[in-house]
Amino acid sequence: MTSYLIRRIFQMALVILLAAVFVYFLFNISPGGPLAGIQQQQRRITREDLARLRTQYELDLYWPVRFSRWLVGVPQGPIVLAGRELLENTPVGCYMPVYEAESSGLQPKIVGCDDYVYMSELPELHPPVRSSNGILRGDFGLSTVISRSRPVSDLLKSRIGPTVQLMSISLLLSLLLGVPIGIYSAVKQYSKFDYFFTTVSFIGSAMPTFFFALLLILLFSVFPVFLVDTIPWVPRLPPGLRESVRSYEVATWLPTVQPGSAFDQFLHLLMPVGVLTFFNMAPWSRFVRSSMLEVMRQDYVRTARAKGLYERVVILKHALRNALIPFVTIVVLALPGLFAGAIITETVFAWPGMGRLYYDALQRSDWNVALAFIFITALLTVIATLIGDILYTIVDPRIKFS
Amino acid sequence: MPNDRLKDNVLIKVENLHTHFFTEDGVVQAVNGVDFAIREGEVMGLVGESGSGKSVTSLSIMRLLGASGKIVDGKVWLKGRDLSQLTEEEMVKIRGNEISMIFQQPTSCLNPVFQIGAQVAEVMEIHQGLGREDAWQQAIEMFRKVGIPDPEGRARNFPHEISGGQAQRVMIAMALSTVPDLLIADEPTTALDVTIQAQILDLMRRLRTETGTAILLITHDMGVIAEMADNVAVMYAGQIVEYTDVNTLFETQLHPYTEGLLAAIPVLGEVRDTLAVIPGSVPNLINLPPGCKFHPRCPYAKPVCVAEMPRLDEVQPGHKVRCHMRLPETMDQWAGVGRADWHFFGDEVMEVVEMAGEAQS
Amino acid sequence: MTATARTIGPSSRAEDATQESQVRVVFRRFRRHRLAVISAILLLVIFGASLLAPVITTFPRDAIDVSSPERPAPPGTVSRDGRMHLLGVDHLGRDLFTRVLYAARVSLTIAFLVVLISETFGSLLGAVAGFYGGRVDMILSRINEFMLTIPQLPILLIISAILLKRDVVLPMPGFVSRLLSALLLAPEREAQKVVVLVLILVLFGWLSAFRLMRGMALTLSKQDFVEALRAAGSSDARIIFRHIVPNGIAPILVSASLNLGAVIVLESALSFLGLGVQDPTPTWGNMLDFARSYMFKHPWLPLVPGIPLVIVSMGFNFIGDGLRDALDPRLKR
């Protein structure tokens, strides 16, 4: 067991490292960064000014050094061991590169170096800033657009609450609704119940989430406004955000909603949770259904009946226990969603969560935020996969670590 | 079926049972008029090929037919109650308690996620009201009784950790833990090695003597019948075609099908060029042939066989058969017809009968 | 008296004599699915309409109708010079009927291209992985597994954002560019940007085809006939292409159909978020994006692009379902 765990963790670390490299690669090619500006002004800028610009964005350092600093925050300067400075004269970058004569275009070719940057010069040229501990130590740098110069991690922390609220409620509801529906559909196969929910699930798998969300808004926020003349009692849901700023009326027969109250929050939660629950519940109920159907055909279910067990016990104890085994993995893999949220749903409903933050970051080119999001999502996915595998071995006695 | 060794009290009586399955492709007439009785402590064998209706008969007794199966006619009497009319509530109390059943492929009959000890204990928990601990101890006892070594340890195993033979022992333990009146064993040894087969059959015999449980043994293996059964009913296309005690059956087969079945068993020491085979194949249960269901494959078939279905009649004391060739009113048509040589392969067996018939005319 | 035992042979049911060709059998079974058939018809109608788009629309795609009484305007609006806008105009005054049809062209073209490339690519990779096994298989399968578990949307979004902002244009031969431009009914510049989007979508599109074909290749490779072929001197490529791949066509077709629905929805989602197809190239997704801002006063606006989107998406799903049942009834339910 321990050797398996060690092996898995090692693999995980590898994957995460690769993810980090990938993310860093994206970061470097992402536009709107330092390179673009330089391209523009290249011809008019002096070598000294160019050098200073490059330093500002750490571009004077060699990319492995840059990557290492981004990842773990080292090296910041010469390594101090037992009072002595090591590696202080190792060149880690080039302050004043020699460019190929008269080259233009995207990136002038660098053919030499006039002034190297040494390890010992690091603390002076690149003093540690507020956030430079490296991604692996939880430091994602500073946000450049959304919250200028605020650490990204602060921003993430502020947004995670609403997302977790939204996702956990809808995941829970999806489970509570999806599993029983799946079971009942399997037990009463071909019944009206089954056909109805098969259709519903079908719609759930084919319909785009954003259109469904828009439809809901149309139905519950837009049309009621038009109908209010003819049908005065029709309720009206707020179309977006998490809380209102002012008090408002939902329907004539309901009390006025106070901003920030529980009722207010509840009303704002209704539609986004509805969307998310629907789109999770549909495939989950299908899965449980087909898993149950598979299991119920097995010999041991017939044995359970032959033993004189009530049908309810046969289904819920003997059959379900087996049918849910593969389902466990699916649920576990949905957990990274607690963080990554639902980008589309949050955007449509203007929900102040992680998904919307990511969307904003992409729109406004705040790459530190966006990349932090991607990295954390990848990390969570890898962890969730591991947990899922371990859980599987616990839940199914036939599977061993091998 | 008189057999002095057995008690006279009838334990279970199946009367004119008809069971059909209603499927998309049509109505499958799996059981078409089956009558038999089992006495207390008797071992009754039910023989036939796959598709003969033997398994469905047993499932009908247990009322485990599933959604598409239905007992459309007939009665099943157990100690004075008609099982076919009971509610599900009442049936649940009988299953595993008064009537137990074991199946083929014992390993797949055990739930893979529960320990085998728990699965046996479960029966006692529900039918005898034992608590967890007591039931578990009882289960270990049963394991010991059925010959599983290291019962305490084994009880914690999961089904995938034990062999097929051990699994069947567990199933037997499960079935007999409530000391049922009847044990239905549906091909209990078919999926097992021959050596294990003998052990399991031994075990069943031994336990039967201890508990006095009657056994309905369903199989296609005549060897198993010879070893275990007191009485035998041969089934074909959902009907019983021959019904007598085991010794008589092996001495004289009145029905052509039984003749063929026994002829098909190779005899040690006998040297033959060809295997004995019953020509043709089992009929489609949705579209049964008219008249006698066996006539398309019968070397002795005559026009009356196509026209009319023969009734099951006791043509000799203690020996019932369903065949025009044996029924008093029609048997004259076969005067002078000799026994077919089943060792001719396939259709040729028909020709020989013709020739033999002609030769004697 | 001759005792003739009438030789009645083994009861053999007369087999339905004619052996229907495989294709006809499949076709017949497919027809039994009413929903699949209805979907196929509807899709053909939409398909046909989009093909005829330049013919049946009276307005140019990007033309802003300044004479329209309001913008956006509901269906049936007649502009001041007497021409009717069948589905109204959008917030800029462009005829919606025209744009919806042109959008059908764009979305359908993208979907077909993506599915074509990813199913082909995925099947080949899968066949190779299953056939050769070993290291190759392990690496490819791991990648496949990982990509199946990570949430696709965030990654697609960021790649698209990066490439879009940099205005990346892939160099391609002239005829490709022209062909695309004709398919999309859009100027070449726009077509070139669409290519980038297609490639991004292929990134996650190959996953299901890979798994399907790999499974097929694994089972088939173990069979004796592969050994026999090898011994007879058949090259690996030949074995793969002539024996393994054809066997996997059926499930790949099903997967392709389902994928078409998924890709259309995915592309719409990306466009809806502004990171897919860009205005002025119309696609149902970006039309929905614009509709969003105006739907409070003009509730019909999102329905115009939304309804065809749902029809097409569900249609592909139904067809995939019908195909699945038609090609292998054993997989039913």
Image: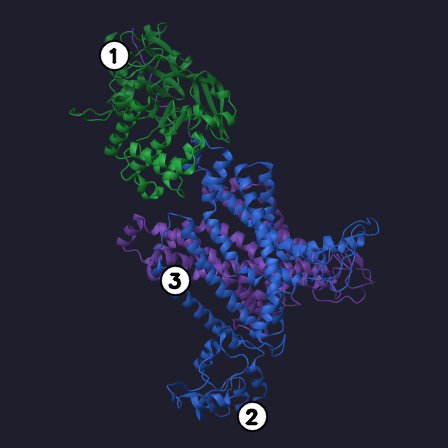
Chain colours: A blue, B green, C purple
- Chain letter belonging to callout 2: A
| Crowd around label 1: few <14 · some 14–19 · many ≥20 (10 Å) | some
Q: Which residue is mark 3?
A: A8
- Chain letter belonging to callout 1: B
Tell which of C97 and C206 is nearer to you.
Answer: C206
Q: Which residue is mark 1?
A: B338
Q: What residue appears at the point 59 percent right and 58 percent down from the top-left corner?
A: A167
Residue B237 falls in image quadrant: top left
Whether pointer 2 and pointer 3 mark residues with C-beta atoms closer than 8 Å, the reply is no
Mark 2–mark 1 Cα distance, whole angstroms, equals 118 Å
Q: What residue appears at the point 59 percent right and 78 percent down from the top-left corner?
A: A32
Q: At numbered mark 3, what does the secondary structure look like: helix, strand or loop?
A: helix
Number of numbered tags placed on the structure image: 3
Mark 2–mark 3 Cα distance, whole angstroms, equals 49 Å
Q: Position of residue C208 (x, y in %)?
A: 47, 55
Answer left or right for C95 relative to A305: right
Answer left or right for A266 relative to A25: right
Q: Along the polypeptide, which appears first: circle 2 or circle 3?
A: 3
Quadrant containing the C terminus of chain B in the rendered view: top left
Asked if A230 appears above or below B337 in the picture, the reply is below
Residue type at mark 3: give it: Arg
Q: Position of residue C109 (x, y in %)?
A: 58, 60
Asked if C328 appears above or below B17 in the picture, the reply is below
Task: Tell me the number on the disc at residue A49.
Answer: 2
- Chain letter belonging to callout 3: A
Q: Is residue B221 visible?
A: no
